[in-house]
Every structure is written in C-alpha cells, then in structure tokens.
Amino acid sequence: MSTGARLGGLGSGWGSVPAAALPPPRPAVVAAKAALSAVVDGRVSFSDFDRLSYARDLWPLALLWIRQGRVPPPPDAIVWPSTEPQVSKLIALARQQKLALIPYGAGSGVCGGTWAIHGGVTLDLKRFDTIGPVDPVRRCVDVGAGVMGETLERKLNARGWTLGHFPSSIYTSSVGGWIAARSAGQLSSRYGKIEDMVLSLRAVLGTGELLVTPERPFSGPDLAPLLIGSEGTLCAFTGARLRVCPLPEGRVFHGFEFGSVAAGLEAIRLVFREGLRPAVVRLYDPFDTAFVGKGKPTGHRAPATPPAKKGALSRGFLPMMLRQVTKQTLGRPKAMNQLQRVFKKSRLILMFEGDAKRAEAEDRAATIICRKLGADDLGEAPGRAWLAKRYDVSYKMSGLIDAGTFADTMEIAAPWEHVLEVYERVHAAASPYAFVLCHFSHAYADGCSLYFSFVGSGGDEAEIEARYHQLWRAALAAAVSAGGNVSHHHGVGLLKAGAMQDALGEARHALAGLKSLFDPDGVMNPGKLGLS
Amino acid sequence: MSTGARLGGLGSGWGSVPAAALPPPRPAVVAAKAALSAVVDGRVSFSDFDRLSYARDLWPLALLWIRQGRVPPPPDAIVWPSTEPQVSKLIALARQQKLALIPYGAGSGVCGGTWAIHGGVTLDLKRFDTIGPVDPVRRCVDVGAGVMGETLERKLNARGWTLGHFPSSIYTSSVGGWIAARSAGQLSSRYGKIEDMVLSLRAVLGTGELLVTPERPFSGPDLAPLLIGSEGTLCAFTGARLRVCPLPEGRVFHGFEFGSVAAGLEAIRLVFREGLRPAVVRLYDPFDTAFVGKGKPTGHRAPATPPAKKGALSRGFLPMMLRQVTKQTLGRPKAMNQLQRVFKKSRLILMFEGDAKRAEAEDRAATIICRKLGADDLGEAPGRAWLAKRYDVSYKMSGLIDAGTFADTMEIAAPWEHVLEVYERVHAAASPYAFVLCHFSHAYADGCSLYFSFVGSGGDEAEIEARYHQLWRAALAAAVSAGGNVSHHHGVGLLKAGAMQDALGEARHALAGLKSLFDPDGVMNPGKLGLS
C-alpha cells in the first residue's frame, strides 16, 4: 500500500507540544486581552489549565500524544460569550487584530476540528444554553447552540417529546457541535441526521453579521445546508429551531444472524426498498459479531446517567477483545484478520418504534425479508442488549490507549452498490496495520454508513504513531477508491481535510469561494476542512 | 388594504413592448453575433419570431399584455449550446462584453423568471437532452437539464421506473427548470420535492466554472441546495443525477367531505402525524369543492398525451365557474366571496400508492382519522376524477384571459399553526379584487402549501391590470403577515422578488454575497430574485 489518502493533519507544519510546558500565549493575543475581556464581561482565560483543557478533543491521536505527556497545540486564550452581539464583537476584534477564532461546543470531536493549530482564541459557546417551550402544533423547539445533548433530550422527554437524535457522544456533545459536524444519531434511519431536524439556524458569520436562515419550505437558494457541516470555518452557531417528535408509544426489537455480510446488507437494502423505516439498523461483520457481547440484556432503557467509568473496561466487547487478542497478536494483525474466514456469521439488530401496532407490522414485514435470505431469528435479546450499552463505546477509548495499543474508528458513507466493495477493500488495506471490525448502520434508501473499528499495536511510541498514520492513509484511500465518501457523521476537521478536498475535485473552488465570502479575513477556525 | 407586499416587477423600470414592432436587438449584442455564433456552431438567432417566442412565459400578466398586442421585454438573441464547454465560453463572452444571459428551460414559469428585462441573450438548454440508463441498485438516472418532464417520465415508465415528479406543467417544463425553480409535483408528499430527488447537480457557474456537486451523504457544507431554487441567477444547470423509484404496485383512492376547512386541515395534519404518507393530499375549500367537477371519473390513468386544447374550455371546473360566475358578478367579487358562508363542505382527496397491501393499510388508518373528524366517505370516485384531469389546469388560463377576465394562482407554504390564518387573511385581503378559491396540498409533517386561485374582472384593460396588481400586493402581504412563506413551488422570478427580499430580512445580504461570488459580473439573469 504505497499510496494513500492525503490526510489533512500530516505535514501541515503543526504537531504536539509538551503538556507540562505549554508555549506561552502569542503576544498578539495577550495584547488583545483587555479588549476581549471588555466584550465578554471578563469571561476570558489565559491560564495554562484552561488552555490545556481546550487543546484536545477525542481524536485518538491526541490520546496517543497524551500518553507521551504531550498535547495538541493549545489556544492562546478562551472566551465565553453569551449573546450574539458579543460574538459579533469578538469576530470584529479578531478581524482587526488578525486573531484566529475557534468556535467550540463540547470538545467531543474525533477529527481535530477544534485544535488550535494556529493558536488564537477558543470561542466556547456553552453559555448559549436556553431551551424554549415546545410548540406542540408545529412540533419544534428553539434551543441555544451550547445546550448539551443529553440535557436537551432529558428535558424534552420530561415533557413527552424527543429530538430523536442519539449520537454515542450525547453526554459530551452540544447542539452547535452536532450542526457544525453534520452529526448523525443512532436512530437516524427513522428521525434523520441533524440537518433533517434543523428548521432554521442562527449563526454569526465570519463577517460579524448575524444570519437567521428562513424556515423551510421556502423559495430561492437554501442557505442553511451551506453552514451545516462547516465546522466553525464559516460561522459560529448560536441557536437553532429543531423539529421534535412525541415519545414513541411502542418499540419492537429483533435480532437476526446471517450467513454472510453480503446477505445481511441485502436484507437492509430490501427493508428500506420496502419503505420500512426501522429506527435502529446495525449489521455487525463476523468479527464484530463474534466480539460483541452476546450476554443477556442488562436493562430495558438507556441509562439516565453516563456509564460509570470505573469498571467500564471490565465488561463489554472491547475488553473481551483485549483479553482475547493480546498485544502480541495485535503486532501481527494481518494474520488475525485472516481469521475472518473462520467466522462467517453476521448479526443484524433492528428496532422499530412509534405507534405500537405499526411498529409490529413493520417488524413482521422485515422478518419475512430476513428469513427469505436465510437468517436465523435471535428474538429481541440482541437489540435490548445493544440498547443498554448504546453509549458505552465513547468511554472506552482512553482505556484502550492506556493498555498500550491504539484504536480508532472510521465511518464512511457509501451508496448500496459500493458498500460491499468499500468494506472489502478497507478491510484488506487496513489489515496489515490493525485488527479490523466493522458494522453497518444509519441506513437510507440509497446506502448506509460503514463504521470500522481499528485496534493496533506496535513497538515504541514513535512506531505506534507511524503505524497509526499508515493505517489511516491506507484505509481512507481504499474507501474512496471503492466509491465511498470520506466521512459519514464524524466530520472532517484536520484528519480528513486533505481527503475531502481531493474528493471535492473542482468543487473545492466553490467551497473556497464561500470561505472568502463569509470569512473574508480567514479568522474562523483556519486550517479546518482544508480551508486556510 | 392600503399597504401591500412589495412586488418585484412593479416600478422597476420595465414594462411591455408592442408585439408587432419589437425594439431592435441592442447594438452590444449584435456586435457579439459572430462570437456567439462561433461558440455554438451557428445556433444563434436574432429573428423577431424567436425573440417574440422567448419574450414570454406563462405568467398571466404576460397573457393580459398579449391580449393588448403587447409582450414582455424580449431578449436580443437566443443561443442553443449543447455542451458544458460551450456554456462556459458563452458565460466568458457575456462577462467580457457585459451581456445579460438568461438560462432557459421550457418557458412554463409563472413569475417572469425568464423575462429579458435587461435584454441580453437567452440560453436555451434544451439540447442537453440525454437520458442515461437507470442504475437499478442505486436507483438513479443521469439526465440532461433540457429533458422535458413528460418525456423523462414516459421513458422511465417504459423501463418500470418513475421519477415521482408530476408538476401540472409536466408537458411544458424541463428538468433544469424544475431545479432552478424548486419545483414540487402533485405526488410530493410521497416522493418529495425536486430537491429531494437530486443526488447531484451539474451546473456552470456565472464564473464560467463547471460545478459537479458531491453526492449525498457526505461531509462539509452542502453546495447543491444553494443552487437549487436560484432561478438562473447563479448558474446554468446542465444535468443532474436523480433518484428514481419502481412503478407502484397498487393505488388506493379515497375521497372525504368535511364540515369545514378547519376539520379537513386537522385530518391532514393528523394523517401526517401518524406517519402515513399519502402520495396525493388535496383539500378543497368550500368554493373549490363546489366548483370542482363532481362528475364521474373519465379515466383511470393519466393521459399519455396532453389534454386536447380543443374543447378544453367546454368542461371542467373553470368553465363551469365561468358560466356560473359571469363577468358582471366578477365585477363585485366581495359579494361573491361572501357566499363562502353558504357553502361549508370541504372535500379531501387522498391517494396512497406503492406496495398494494401497505397502501390499503395506510388508507384504513387515514379513514379512521377522517371519520373521527366527522367526514362523509365519498369512496374512490373523486380521486379517480382528479387523476384523469390532473394536468388540465395548465391549459385553461389562456382561455380565461380571452374571456375578458383575469386569473392567477398563488401558492404559499405555511407551517400547520399558521395555515388556517393564512387562508382566512388571504381570502379577506383578495376578496375585494377577485373571486377566491383555495386548495391545500403538498403536505408535510410540518405544514402544507395553500394554492389560491383568483378570478377577477374589471373595466377596460388598464383597469384590469391595475386591479391585478392590487390583488397581488394585498394577497401576498396578507400571506406573509399571517406567517406564510412567499412561495411554495412556483418560484420567485420578478413577481415575488421584492416580497422574498423583504422576507429574507438580514439574510438577504448573504444571498447578495453568494450572487457576487458565483456571478461576479452580474451577467446571470439579472434582476431576478431581487438580485441585480
């Protein structure tokens, strides 16, 4: 695998810095301290503690660095505005003083989207934390961009509503972050991705102007989709009007086991072609099937609080994998990956929800499709087991890194005709570098997301990091060459910036033009999405 | 009604010209004749016959003028490119010579979107007429922007597929025109509006660059929605990849009659809240119910050819209305409109299609909702009668105008909580100027479109035209003040340009910025959408 995808982060002139001895804030930012402070009523920090906290996100590369006592480049300062005029003034100041501004939600990104690679000021938007009343006729709610996901969902639930948006980061991500990164939740096949829930947006552009997008349906060009997924490079989000749904009356879980990945994918495709809209669709490849906990369900509903970190490594699929696949065997991942030939069974979890009778009818129709394709019926247990642990994965990565391995995930969108090829080619390309698992989820009538998990090991820290980059280059290049898109719902940030620019082709000029229009001085999150 | 909505067309310094003595082509365009001709291999025309043909669209204001022997301002020339490089070269030439370029599909717009108000060159795109093979796995087809709607649908049908897009203009509109004007078809509640069918777009921007938008789902900002609905002001469309669906296995028609408009609207809202997705939803207000032909259905399927123009005025609801509502009574529309108090019944037509059993099940669920709201069951006849005449209305406007009256339609999108208020306020505002009918269609979970029909009369031609403008100003202002959007699927053009700009508020600056970015010399369809 001599050629690979262009990764935005590599060779771009930035790297880690020692956590114990951060470089001092840049003089230009220090010089603006009084002006920044005046805008936000003193809510500005230059402390190393805060700079350290805001330096990193959940990109495993940062975790590898932290193990070595290093962190990504920190911002020079952090500000906490609470009104749109304050954000406008901060942008005006940044343009005047040539400071980079990094809009910041909750720091749960996994692609370096909030890394301060050019220093500057992190714009934490968490004080935009209002949740308005639910409009029951229109079924929408106005929320601030800084509202945390789980808080919003819990408060909506208490009033009988749901947003229907359940990213595994729900405890550690914000509404603004979801919109900035084009987020998808676990129930997206029924409720849509975040862009489907946004009725209108409030954003302060890099010009300093407030833009409130018109509500759909409407006439003329649609401005909202231009800002959704812009990852802080065009604007800072301050709020949104979001569609809500009543809590579902009923839920039906159903697990199936197929003789191959191909048969399972065909089942999903046919389920969607039939017009069925399961809320959850998750097909695990043979390794993921073998390593996913097959135990009894531990509970019916999602936990109301985040899974306890203590003991999180003592149960579940990743620790089981860790026990079974020792560091030594991870050093020979190709051999391990060939065991895939032994494991053949591929497990599918479906969950239908909404009107109870209709959910049951949809499940019956899906069951007929699965049986025709030779699936074994596993009943409701696998689905309930998944639900009980649905957010756990987000809390396990650190433990894996601590265990002397590296791990990461890669989500790739692909149309149905390319899904199997993307799967096979990424598997082959990543195989020399890491142990590879994959599940298929977020299905549409047109295609689905492939969610790869990679676990690898190496010699010393330099070797591990080199292998990590080799893995990403090879896997992303394979995904794109097989007809996949560079991402599905993790965003682009630094990690996939080069690959996204390559995939855009000539369309990258239009994106660069939009950048120059909405952020004429290039102060908004410079370097992300491959936009300087 | 002293204040009204700002209409883009009025007071903008342009008006009609005599059809028999067109002003000669502008010298700047004549001077470019050889250069234009060289780009398109001689396919350029300066003839008065062609200029006359391309001067008008189906905006009833043009029909009023034509009755007086006048036409909207004609283009100076027409060109027929057939390749993307030709379009790029034409744009380069236009930028160099400061010529306006007007992208043109099939001329069926009703808002003046293709009127050559600054002269210039009409860019007829009908030679982009390819229809690629259907990809049966991905379910999509690549088509040229100039393909006519009915041609595409017929050719897809022959292969077992449908686009699911049935605007009443289907015989007289093109794929590029649909995308440019954000078109919706009669079955949009099931298949979506045109923007939901577009997987990717090919467009030559006003910079001369070809933009091929990435296929969804993907990462980063979404460029396609920015061009959809841009009505020639940012780019010329050359082609699109469109989603297709298999022809439906079954269809179920069901008509209901409600005691009031409010009850019928509540039924539609609940049908969508239940998750049911009828392909057709049409609720007629009492006048529209009374005047819609209640006769037996004349056929099962839509005709394969356009309805014969001969005799089109001798049957159907408009001629019946014409007979019943004479020119004299139309001179006193307010009194006529008050008869609405006598007529109360509001008729709903539903049609479900797709898998036969599922369509029946959906119909049963919808029937329960309608009966609970006190509806009388009319069986399948009203739906079949509608289907048989579904495209006829597009061919009747000229006849009405010839009959010495004026008529127009206004479609307004509104969220559910404002639909009834938009209906009542537009009805009251338009009532002094015209006889008012309305139906509600294109329903979503969030709202629907209100489709008003106005028929009026006046004294001499000047009086009729003055009343026509008074009507529009009053009706549009009432719609917007009641919470409606200025349009749903007819586009903006000149007619609604001022009102759209007002509705955008501060967001108009962002739109103006996009205009300057993608059309830096302002050559693309200047003056439309309120963009100079």
Image: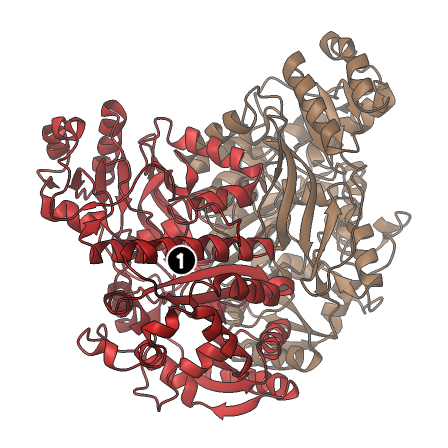
Chain colours: A red, B brown
> What type is the residue that disc 1 sits on?
Ser
Instruction: Give the residue number, with chain letter if any, for mark 1.
Output: A183
For this view, does A193 lie left or right of residue A393?
right
**Is residue A296 toward the left or the right of residue B418 in the image?**
left
Residue B85, quarter of picture: top right
Number of marks: 1
Q: Residue at x 26, y 61 (%)?
A: A172
From the viewer's perspective, tell me whether residue A319 is left or right of residue A2. Answer: left
Q: Nearer the viewer, residue A202 or B287?
A: A202
Where A345 falls versus A485 (above or below)?
below
Q: Residue furthest right?
A: B310
Closer to the camera in the image, B325 or A383 = A383
Could you tell me which residue is drawn at 47 percent across and 70 percent down? A438
Neighbourhood count class around disc 1 (C-alpha, 10 Å): few under 14, some 14–19, many 20 upward: many
Q: Is residue A153 visible?
A: yes
x, y percent for residue A446: 60, 63
Q: Position of residue A281 (x, y in %)?
A: 49, 75
The image position of residue B138, as x and y in percent, is: 67, 62
Name which residue lies at 88% across and 54% down: B305
**Considering the numbered disc 1 on the image, is that residue within a helix, a strand or a loop?**
loop
Quarter of the figure that contains the C terminus of chain A = top left
- Percent across and percent down for residue B377 are 65, 78
Quadrant of the rendered image containing residue A463: bottom left
- What chain does badge 1 belong to? A
Q: Is residue B4 visible?
A: no
